[in-house]
Image: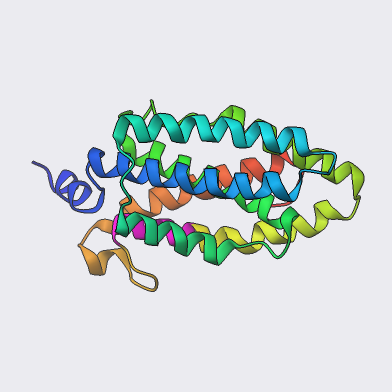
Amino acid sequence: MTRETEIHDALVPATAELRQFAVRALVSLETELDALRKEYSSLSVALEISHAADLIAQRAGYARETVGAEPHEHYDNLIAQLWARTRGRDAHEQLLSVHLNAGFFEDVLRHLGDGQLDDLIGWEDVQESVVDALRKLFELDTKLDDRLAVWGRRIAGDSVLWARQILGIAPGEHPDDVIEGADEIVEAMVKALFAQHSRRMNTLELAA
């Protein structure tokens, strides 16, 4: 076993653990989108939000049936921390948080899963419905996109720093202090997450 493999195995959760994380992430997104469905039920984007909520509920249901429905204390607490850090001050900010956090969840799983999580990820249709809703909201309120651009930039750093905890890197901790040579693996994930975040923001024509 090479030194790089040893570091990777020490940092990256086993596939079974990542599958548990995927389930808990999907369950949290199901909860958030169901709440937003109620928030937007009487507005012009109700159809798009409802469609996204239905799609993520299907994904979460499949994940529970495939992997299991039991709570996972560590991942549930970790995911709750992310939502606490990125909780929007109104429904519009929270809708963008759901879009961006769903992206962070999926990007982490894809980056670390080495193709072993493909049955649990692939939420493009969910995200497309959320993006459609956001674009419609931007048309209705021409100042909203500027405000949400600021919000997206504000939460990005917190979200990426949060993602390091999945690799066992506590806030304020340097990866090489956890295990020598870890920095390269952690930074590769961070770089990938920021790149995908920028792509999502650019798709919505929001400055990243």
Question: In the current view of this chain or complex, which residue is farthest to the left?
Answer: 1
Residue 115 counted in the magenta span: no
Q: Nearer the viewer, residue 207 or 121?
A: 121
Quarter of the image containing the N terminus? top left
Seen at 73% across and 55% down, the residue is 91
Above or below residue 20? Residue 150 is: below
Identify whether 39 is placed above or below 55: below
Residue 164 highlighted magenta (yes or no): yes
Q: Locate residue 174: give its quadrant.
A: bottom left
Q: Is residue 47 above or below residue 200?
A: above
46 sits to left or right of 115: right
**For this view, does 102 lie left or right of residue 183?**
right
Is residue 182 shown to the viewer in this render?
A: yes
Q: Which residues are magenta?
A: 160-168
Chief secondary structure of the magenta portion: helix
On the image, the x and y values in percent for residue 183 come to 31, 58
> Could you tell me which residue is drawn at 46 percent across and 61 percent down?
80
Instruction: Please tell me which residue lies in front, 170 or 70.
Output: 70
